[in-house]
Amino acid sequence: MKKILLFASGAGSNVENIIQYFKNNNEVAVVGVFSNNPEAKVLEKAQVHHVPTLVFNRAELNEGFVLAKINELQPDLIVLAGFLWKMPEEIVHHYPNKIINIHPALLPKYGGKGMYGMNVHKTILENKEHETGITIHYVNEHYDEGEFILQQTVNIESCQTPEEIAAKVHELEHEFFPKVIEQILNPKS
């Protein structure tokens, strides 16, 4: 059984989508949802699906508590699905090429500290981009700089608001994120 551990900070639409995608899979299981936000809606969504949750603060993330909890679960893949804090180097080094993230833009554009969610979509709209998309990438010591796994684009010329862009990007996220996770965990030989 391959084990996925999810990290999220907000509403958790990607987390819920991933849980649903693997719900009846006998080879892959979501073993936990970790969040830095005790008010995050993702915690309720995980509990509805009977997935254990853990809430932690910045000190616990940076001082080994979270790493110890990860080690207890022994995940095959750690998935950042709307997790807004930088993953500490200690965790990245313990799990090389086993941590992935999804970014709501076509990296390297619109990446880095502070570039998440609506901040990304507003900036893309202000810059009058004709397309945007998603980047699924491995996590390293720097924001949004890990090796790309997949990029998908979507035309946004008809979009008038950041919310319209967000809706198109969410469609890509929900379609491709679980498939990429599955491919990483069970590569076709």
Image (cartoon, rainbow, N blue to C red):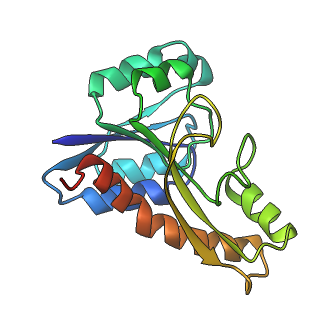
State the image coordinates of residue 56 (x, y, percent, origin top left). Answer: 52, 27
State the image coordinates of residue 21 (x, y, percent, origin top left). Answer: 30, 62
| Vertical comparison of 172 with 73: above or below | below
Q: Decide which of 187, 181 is in the foreground and name it.
A: 187
Q: Is residue 136 left or right of residue 70?
A: right
Q: Decide which of 64, 183 is in the foreground and name it.
A: 183
Instruction: Please state the total of marks drawn on the protein image.
Output: 0
State the image coordinates of residue 144 (x, y, percent, origin top left). Answer: 63, 43
| Vertical comparison of 97 with 128: above or below | above
| Vertical comparison of 134 with 138: above or below | below
State the image coordinates of residue 10 (x, y, percent, origin top left). Answer: 57, 49
Outermost residue, front direction? 189
Q: Quadrant of residue 86?
A: top right
Residue at x 45% of width, y 45% of height: 43
Residue at x 55% of width, y 46% of height: 40
The quadrant of the rendering that contains the N terminus is: top left
| Vertical comparison of 42 with 134: above or below | above
Q: Is residue 22 left or right of residue 175?
A: left
Outermost residue, bottom direction? 158
Q: Decide which of 69, 42 is in the foreground and name it.
A: 69
Outermost residue, top direction? 63
Residue at x 52% of width, y 37% of height: 139
Residue at x 38% of width, y 49% of height: 46
